Amino acid sequence: MQIPVSHHQYVLLDTDAEAPFENIDDRRAGSGLVSVNAEGTYASVKTGTPHGDLEVTFDIQPAEPAADFSQWDEVVEVSLYFSGEGPLAGDPVSDDYVNVSLLGEEDDYQWWRFRIHARGRDTVHDPAAPPEQHLVQVWPAPQAPEIRHKLTDQTGHRRRNPDPDYYARVKAAEAAVFLSEGTSYASRPVTPLVADLEEEQGQ
């Protein structure tokens, strides 16, 4: 199905979920493909496509499907908590979402494993290259830690390892602001000063 994308991401969320708070250290340490809030009710999937529609295949199974990563650049598996009604998938900026139904009742909440595959994130601006595609395999399973099955594209690498000079400049600027306010540097969030980090790296 076609999933709306903006700012190099689409999200999977429960209707009442809140986006995770991420500081720059979280972004550096992430998988480069998907990040999840603490409650497991909101996931942000990073794309090479900056805006528009992205082809995402959802494969919903009653048990863990066979794994085959050979045709994919990045594969990461996470736990998410949804009802059988499933998550909304799409653009968090415009609130343009598609419903993805899971197996179960509307009010039956449980943990699911989401195995997210991506390919073509590096070549999205090459008209001769195949389009970016994602596959999301989903099955009911107990909550478990994230598994990074495959991490090979440059889009993910840049997200996992931002430019060190940029990172150092941001941290220095934050430290100066916090010290000028008479506040301990380590005790304040850094998100406001790095809001454009992902956009800059995606260019």
Image (cartoon, rainbow, N blue to C red):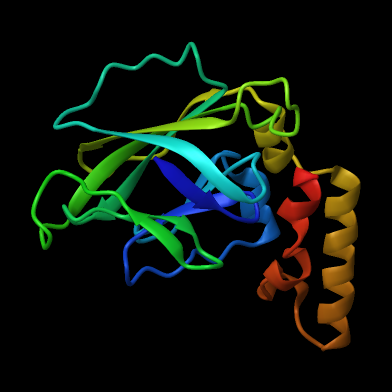
Position of 54 compared to 85: left or right?
right
Determine the residue positioned at 46% across, 47% down: 3
x, y percent for residue 33: 55, 39
Q: Is residue 43 visible?
A: no
Give the x, y percent position of residue 189. 66, 72
- Along the line of sight, the residue nearer the viewer: 19 or 183: 19
Q: Is residue 200 left or right of residue 138?
A: right
Q: From this viewpoint, is residue 124 visible?
A: yes
Q: Nearer the viewer, residue 84 or 128?
A: 128
| Residue under the point 12% across and 60% down | 106
Q: Quadrant of the N terminus?
A: top left
* Residue sitting farthest toward the bottom: 181
Q: Residue 25, how many percent across, how many down?
A: 67, 54
The x, y position of residue 43, in whole percent, is: 44, 53
The quadrant in which the C terminus is found is top right
Number of disc labels: 0
The one of 58 and 31 positioned closer to us in this rendering = 58
Q: Residue at x 28, y 16 (%)?
A: 66
Location of residue 107 with respect to 66 vertically, above or below: below
- Single out the residue that lies furthest toward the front: 127
Up-down relation of residue 161 to residue 171 (above or below)? above
Rendered position, 74 above or below 66:
below
